Image (cartoon, rainbow, N blue to C red):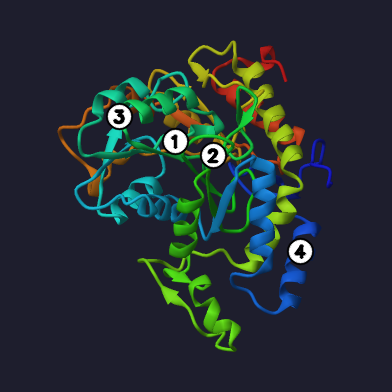
Amino acid sequence: MTALPSRAPLVERGDVARRVKVSRGCLGAEELEAVRGAFEYGYFGLAHLVFEFEQALRDYLGAPEVVAVSSGTAALHVALDALGVGAGDEVIVPSLTFVAAFQAIAATGARPVPCDVEPETLLPDLDHVDALITARTKAVMPVHYAGSVCDPERLAALRARHGVRIVEDAAHAFGATCRGRRVGSRGDVICFSFDSIKNITCGEGGAVACHDASLARVVRQKRALGVDRARGAGAASRGADWRFDVVTRGYRYHMSNINAAIGLAQLRKVEAFLARRRAICRRYDRAFAAIDGLRPLRVDYDEAAPHIYVVRVAAGRRDALMEHLAEAGIETGINYIPNHLHPLFSDPAVRLPHTEAAFGEILTLPLHCALSDEDVDRVIERVASFFGAGREVPL
């Protein structure tokens, strides 16, 4: 396994230290070699490496069914579609998430219903979710924000009490556990993303995990334009290998062999990636604990799989801190603009006080496996200098 950077020197460009990226993937020679092998195979679509990647994911997650697709958004959409979510239905989802979740719901013809979040974790407020469920609610889409995990027992209770499906958006949480069990090993339907900055990357990719073999079969059909080649097996055995049946509405959502090759190489590094991410987050937490006006989220790093590191900045100073960091070449982000504030999904009747308060305060600091210890020191020192904490902050 490739060692991850810990004390790599800063790369200088003239008199200015290199920019510290807020997020990035961490790929190396192993991924390049894997792609070379995929090139040599000569067919780059849905082929053997995709099936190997699915098996590797099943083994890692402890999920009996995993279907690899072209993106995390595709995973959400095809999962909802396979469950029969459509026009006239509603899906409850936190507003504080990437727009992909809302677009995936809208693509089925259903209406996304935004829910509020818990202020300490920014996970969905499941009491609010419970209150929003109506006869039109077909599914609930909890988001495992920043790599923390929604309570699986409460999600199961919601499903049992109301008869709704639970489609977990685990785009941030690949590798996370809850009470010792990995996300994806239990639950109804769990969707992952493997885009360029996630905990592992395929370049682009996603996956749907579940325990229902019949649902997984429909997802496999839908990811490949509704094609069922097994039903044409009799004709194929007589030499008509072109024969297949189209059995359901479908999409071109399959993962490519090239992306799967990258994913297989990344999966072998996932535990080292998670260890480095957790170590960086713990350093941030220690450094920021005593700074007035700055509050990290409440995260259990023994189980969370941190994808982003988010703090809340009080007293309207968030934007000024962003500028202070940018002047030092340190990128930051805001995850996210609440979806009920976007023109497409806006509704003047929707009021989400915790979400709206968080949106004015949240700031995402750099977190990825290419950060050196010196990079992390640089972020901590610059944040501390903004608040006048200086050398009192532990590194």
Mark 1, residue position: 143
User: Cα distance, mark 2 to mark 4?
Assistant: 25 Å
Mark 2, residue position: 172
Q: Amino acid at mark 4?
A: Ala
Mark 1–mark 2 contact, CB under 8 Å? yes
Within-10-Å neighbours for mark 1: few <14, some 14–19, many 20+: many
- Of 297 and 179, nearer the camera is 179
Q: Amino acid at mark 3?
A: His
User: Quarter holding the C terminus?
Assistant: top right
Which callout, 2 or 4, points at the residue further toward the start of the chain? 4
Helix, strand or loop under label 2: loop
Helix, strand or loop under label 1: loop
| Residue 297 - label | none
Which callout, 1 or 3, points at the residue further toward the start of the chain? 1
Of labels 2 and 3, the one closer to you = 3
Mark 3, residue position: 162
Number of dots carrying numbers = 4
User: Cα distance, mark 4 to mark 3?
Assistant: 46 Å
Q: Can I make out residue 347 in this image?
A: yes
Looking at the image, residue 233 sits to the left or right of residue 162; the answer is right
Which callout, 1 or 2, points at the residue further toward the start of the chain? 1
| Residue 34 - label | 4
